[in-house]
Amino acid sequence: MLFRSEDTTESIRHICEQCDLLSRMLDDLLDLARLEAGAQNGPQGVPVSVSELIRSTLPALAAVKGERDISLAPLSDDMKVIGDPGQLRKILLNFLSNACKYSPDRSRVRIDVLRRNEAGRDSASQIGLRVTDEGKGMSEEEREHAFERFWRADPAGTIPGTGLGLNIARTVVEQHGGSIDLRSEPGRGTEITAW
């Protein structure tokens, strides 16, 4: 039996994609284990510039950005949050990566930095990182499951991912004393905010 070079090339590409997926899943599982092991102590907090956090995260999107336009609201360079910079970057990268993967080419993904006062908190305000896309959106059932481990909005597997990203993001945000707001409707995109 002879194989065509096109078949061999396609098989190798598919094997490489599956290896990448397994590698990401292993990395995500290790992240979860580290987060759960460190949950008793909480994250190590240092002042993190929000503008620097966003600017340092954007280059990591090159592989999934495609032809999507990522717009950024004007930022104040003096806005800071207390947290683990690496973990905060993972949250933002997950939100942006999902926005790009679930949105069509030539659509817009927007990053906004919000500030809100929350009753009952010692601090005067919270900072929110919001990512909004023009993608396919989620049904009510999909929103209910979005933060579960290994749950995928794309069960057929046509969009790459492990189903762990939002679970990790929620764990990190909660360990930082925050919360996540998720708003989404089918055909109208998704808006997700880490407070």
Image: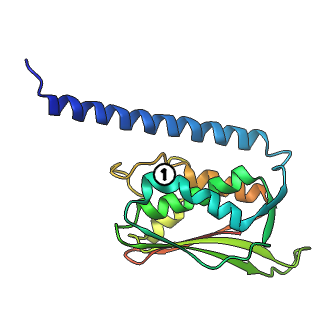
Residue 13, how many percent across, how many down?
A: 30, 35
Residue ID at (60%, 78%): 73
Q: Is residue 148 visible?
A: no
Residue 108, how many percent across, how many down?
A: 44, 74
Secondary structure state at the residue bearing disc 1: loop
Task: Categorize mark 1 by other alpha carbons within 10 Å: few (<14), some (14-19), many (20+).
Answer: some
Q: Is residue 84 visible?
A: yes
Q: Is residue 9 above or below residue 44?
A: above
Residue 171, how many percent across, how many down?
A: 69, 53
Residue 112, how many percent across, how many down?
A: 62, 76
Horizontal side of 34 relative to 58 (left or right) equals right
Q: Is residue 118 above or below residue 89?
A: below
- Identify which residue, 158 or 108, lies in the foreground: 108
Horizontal side of 76 relative to 101 (left or right) equals right
Horizontal side of 92 relative to 178 (left or right) equals left
Farthest top residue in view: 1
Q: Amino acid at mark 1?
A: Trp
Residue ID at (80%, 82%): 117
Residue ID at (55%, 35%): 26
Horizontal side of 47 relative to 136 (left or right) equals right
Q: Quadrant of the image for the C terminus?
A: bottom right
Q: Quadrant of the image for the N terminus?
A: top left
Residue annotated with mark 1:
151
Residue ID at (69%, 68%): 51
Colour scheme in use: rainbow
Farthest right residue in view: 122
- Identify which residue, 166 or 145, lies in the foreground: 166
